[in-house]
Amino acid sequence: MNTDIENLFKDKVLGHPAGLMVLFFTEMWERFSFYGMRILLILFLTAPFASDNPGWDWPREHALALIGTYASLLYLTPIIGGYIADKFTGYRIAVVIGCAIMTLGHAFMALETTTTFYLGLAFLVIGTGFFKPNITSIISEMYKGKESKKDGAYTIFYMGVNAGAFFGMMLCGYLAENFGWSWGFGLAGIFMFLGMMQFLLAKNLFGDVGGKPSKIYEVELPQNINEESPKPIEEEETTEKLNPFLTLDYILIVLSAVGGLLYLFNDPIEKISGENLLPFEVLGLSGSNFIVLFALVLFLILLVSRISRYIPLVRDRIIAVVFFGIFTVIFFAAFEQALGSMTLFARDYTNRNLVGSAAMIFKVVDALLTTVPLLIITWVLYLLFKKTYSRIALSNIVLALAFVGIWGLVVYRLFDKFSQEGNQIDASWFGILNSFFIITLAPLFSRWWESKYNPSAAMKYGLGLILLGLGFAILSYGSAGVVQGSKTASVSMIFLILAYLLHTMGELCLSPVGLSYLSKLVPARMIGFMFGIWYLAIAIGQKTAGTMGGMIDKISEQYSLSTFFLMFTLVPIAFGVISIVLNPVLKRLMHGVR
């Protein structure tokens, strides 16, 4: 294995092995397809029948119930996919399996029938489970013994994440909104397939790296481009009794998991089709609400039971992780409104029509935003081509074809926009702002974290939640003039742009925390269990985002749209203040871990 790693480092691009660039482009095309499809979901499901581009005309609550379940499952299946790769397939085969399944998922969605739509979503959930945990595990294996270069590798890799998200939302959204939803869903599938082929054809570059199942599951999943790579916590020099899972623990895990999954599936089924999988009431609670609360209680009993059996030092650190998990749920419940209510706000409540000089200025800015990053990435492709053409020629040819395609789409889109007298900004365009702000602001935040002014974990969480709340405060203020119960308005787009800016700054405050602190606070033998708990927290946040976002019509009719966004202002800010106030307590619980 060491020989394979050394061979990988012989051909370098930007100071890193050429294999990292193969993974960069694989991740870029997967994120292109994932985010390109994701931004279309709420628009397609809620688009009126009687329109130039008819959708399914679903109520917003129904659409967001489905989207919440879909987004939640995306953070649960990687736990299974990582386990399968560790025990049976190996990382590289798991990545190919994930790509193939997701390609089929996009193809099914492009058909736009009810059956193929749900089948497509299912395939995307399963495929993400195979892909998401294992492509980063390949990087982990590549950099064994070269940990000093790992942070730089992840920085480059996550540039691919955000580049893919940027172009996916821009181009899939453009085709879907201007030519038909099938074009957007189909384009996502095409680039997913090309990403899979260029990765598969580059297998000779990796040797045995990622090819054999490892006996130890290493968690290497930073959430963003400036997150520190996880470092395994050193075992304490103390006699520590093990804390094996008891029969009761397994029973609680199974019951809480079954209860949670029943709620995840029943919620959208009940709202969309009227069929209730849990047709009963307990103490005035519907079957669905009772089951999810019961599952939550069982899970809390499991957590308290297991934590109480650890020695004090380990117990304290896990309690700190639990606090961060709660803050994570709150953050994602609000942040992921970008998937639902903020996209609806962009389409239905934002003035997206520009005329005269304003239209021309936007076209020029849009052209620069599109072409400059693509030129830089094309230059990286050229460097990879020059270094590896003799070894992975077919892979590079497939990658070149993909870039010919994306350049063609970019040029066509810009020509179309410049040929219009005015300009109507696509609703999906606003989704690219998060990726753009991450790419531009991440170096500044990274330098902040490396300075002597680097805040503690609790302070970062507090700042992130407060910035997130301030973003929604801007939307609340901007929508103050929207008439109660109105389904359309013409609010200035500056409010939405500023909201995305503050939300991204909040995300960058949290991104160095997440799994990085988890890996530092939890003993290595417990990483698997706590990794699952952490992703469960994100999954709960995703589902909560869909449920709360689905309340947009009810709150707007009873109060106002401004009140709806005010809800997402007050809750994150309140929890942000709590995180900052608890900073001394959490520091003590972390026992010196920074």
Image (spheres, rainbow, N blue to C red):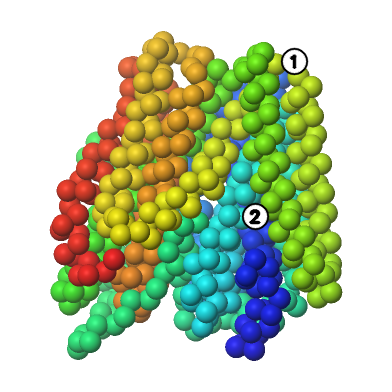
Specify whether 559 is left or right of 214. left
Position of 275 relative to 96 (above/below): above
Specify whether 224 is left or right of 589. right
Q: Quadrant of the N terminus?
A: bottom right
Residue at point 79% right, 22% down? 419
In the rendering, at what x and y percent does residue 100 appear? 70, 60
Q: Amino acid at mark 1?
A: Glu
Q: Amino acid at mark 2?
A: Met
Within 10 Å of disc 1 (Cα), the crowding (few <14, some 14-19, many 20+) is few
Q: Quadrant of the C terminus?
A: bottom left
Residue at point 34% right, 45% down? 464
Query: For residue 424, what is the image quadrant?
Result: top right
In the rendering, at what x and y percent does residue 112 appear? 70, 37
Residue 592 visible, this orientation: yes
In the rendering, at what x and y percent does residue 585 appear? 15, 58
- Which residue was labeled with disc 2? 28
- Which residue was labeled with disc 1? 421
Position of 153 relative to 279 (above/below): below
In the rendering, at what x and y percent does residue 374 appear? 70, 47
Residue at point 81% right, 75% down? 391
